Amino acid sequence: MLIGYHVSIAKSIDLAFDRAIKLTCNTFQLFLMNPRSWHAKELGKEEIMRFRKKNRVFNMPIFAHMPYLPNLASSNKEIYEKSISALNLNIERAKLLNIKNLILHLGSSVGNDKKDAIERVISALNNIDNNDISLILENEAGFRNSIGSDIESLIYILDRLEGKNKGICLDTCHLFASGYDIRDKKVVKNIIEETSNFLKVIHLNDAKYNLGSGKDRHENIGYGYIGIDGFKSFLSFDEIVSKPLILETPMERSGVKELNLVRSIVAMDKI
């Protein structure tokens, strides 16, 4: 089973590997720049070389994640163009580091027509030169004007994108917050059937707020409203546990124990 965390790139981006290995990860996720800024510090040649070397040595699936500010659904021309530039920058950084997967949020219509917002997303993504980089769309938590909270809209967008290098990242907290009760195996089965052609990776997070809250607030596994029994149901499907599982849970309680908890839930289901 492939399981890991979103890890820090502090001090040097290649240290993400060291942190992931210390946590017993065999896959991990990272940002390629400061997630709360439009500006990116240039990656040094030695830093890139160290990352690429560790990538060859450890040979594990890596998922880069876009920063928070870009909004590909925005009707504001300046924000829209800056968002496309940020996506291009992250794609170029992924290429430099030999990372093949880039996860992105689609943004918000900010009160404007959602159909128009979706068309802006499709237009932006169809004009991106992603070549060997797989663009993986993440579902949203259902907050107000967010794009991609429902699986149908994600599938609609993916079906309209040119090329085959694309996919879906399902976040369990976001699913739950947007009204999908993944504690119910029937609900999970329906989600699997809908996303089967595109599902690439799972963000495994408990939810700090109850079903349908629309709030993107992650909690550690078993500490939130999805709970241990909910994850037992969700992780009982081979179609789920065969995908890389990335935890983005609060770091103060994260660690090897939390990864082992997930491993034990999956192992118990196999007995």
Image (tube, rainbow, N blue to C red):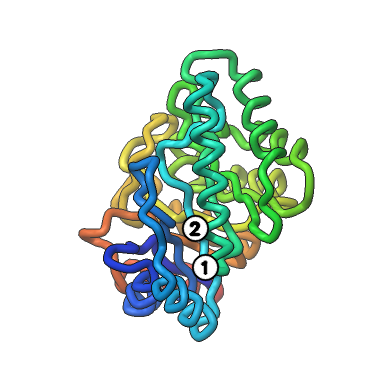
Please count the marks in the image: 2
Quadrant containing the C terminus is bottom right
Along the viewing direction, whichever of 172 and 25 lies nearer the viewer: 25
Q: Residue at (43%, 27%) from the top-left corner?
A: 143
Contact flag, marks 1 and 2 (Cβ < 8 Å): yes
Tell whether 269 sits left or right of 12. Answer: right
Three-letter residue code for mark 1? Leu
Along the viewing direction, whichever of 130 and 167 lies nearer the viewer: 130
Three-letter residue code for mark 2? Ala
Label 1 CA crowd tier, 10 Å (few <14, some 14–19, many 20+): many
Q: As drawn, which residue projects farthest toward the top?
A: 112
Which of pointers 1 and 2 indicates the residue nearer the eye? 1
- Quick check: 81 above or below 199? above
Tell whether 101 sits left or right of 18. Answer: right
- Quick check: 106 above or below 186? above
Q: Residue at (35%, 77%) from the top-left corner?
A: 18
Residue 56, located in which quarter of the rendered image?
A: bottom right
Along the viewing direction, whichever of 134 and 244 lies nearer the viewer: 134
Label 2 CA crowd tier, 10 Å (few <14, some 14–19, many 20+): many
Residue 20, position as x, y percentages in the image: 38, 73
Q: Residue at (64%, 58%) from the top-left corner?
A: 133
The disc label shown at residue 97, or none = 1
Quadrant containing the N terminus is bottom right
SS class of the residue under badge 1? loop
Q: CA distance from mark 1 to mark 2?
A: 10 Å
Tell me if I can see residue 178 in this picture.
Answer: no
Residue 249, position as x, y percentages in the image: 33, 55
Read off the residue under disc 2. Answer: 64
